[in-house]
Amino acid sequence: MSGVRIGYSQSEGASHLEGASQKAGVDTEHGNEEHIEAPMFHGSAGDRVTPEYTEFSNPLYLLKTSLEDRISVLLQNNSSITGLLASFDEHMNLILINAEETGHSLNRFFPLLVIRGDSIIFVTRRRFTSII
């Protein structure tokens, strides 16, 4: 199966993260097997097509509209992470920049952090400190 490629590039002096993939489809070059590529967002205009998400048609709409903004994420271990959303994929795997983790009597800072989507309970644009 084809994976998602996320790379670092510099364009006109400004650096940015960019992820690329194609719209979901069937690859017929590999015999009878079906190889699916899932949609992925990219940070700059390119030759890839970005899927359309609307406010209520897809839960990923919140993530799409929050790109390059600060978000807060609550994880299954009850810690919260706040950082700048750089990229995400259809599994809700997130890449955060300048992320701060709080919880379990600790505070940690990560310049670049990848969060696996299946460990996320919820995502919000507002900062939160604890769950009752």
Image (tube, rainbow, N blue to C red):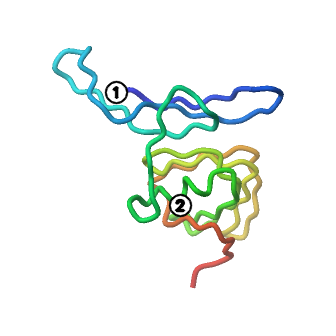
Residue 39 appears left or right of 109: left
Identify the residue at image location x=71%, y=35%: 16
Q: 10 Å neighbourhood of mark 1: few (<14), some, or many (≥20)?
A: few
Q: Kindly report the distance in space between the C-alpha atoms of the residues bearing marks 2 and 1.
A: 27 Å
Pick the front one: 41 or 124: 41
Which percent across, then down, holds residue 43?
63, 38
Give the residue drawn at x 68%, y 29%. 8
Residue 24 in picture, x, y percent from top left: 34, 36
| Label 2 crowd bin: few (<14), some (14–19), many (20+), radius 10 Å | some
Q: Residue furthest bottom?
A: 132
Quadrant placement of the C terminus: bottom right
Q: Position of residue 25 (x, y in %)?
A: 30, 31
| Image mark for residue 1 | 1
The quadrant in which residue 128 appears is: bottom right
Of residues 97 and 102, which is closer to you in this image?
Answer: 97
Which is closer to the viewer, label 2 or label 1?
2
Query: Mark 1 or mark 2, which is nearer the start of the sequence?
Result: 1
Disc 2 marks which amino acid?
Leu
For disc 2, the marked residue is 62
The answer to whether residue 19 is above or below residue 100 is above
Residue type beneath disc 1: Met
Above or below: residue 61 compared with residue 79: above
- What residue is shown at x 54% (from left), y 46% (from top)? 88
Q: Would residue 109 be found to the left or right of residue 4 on screen?
A: right
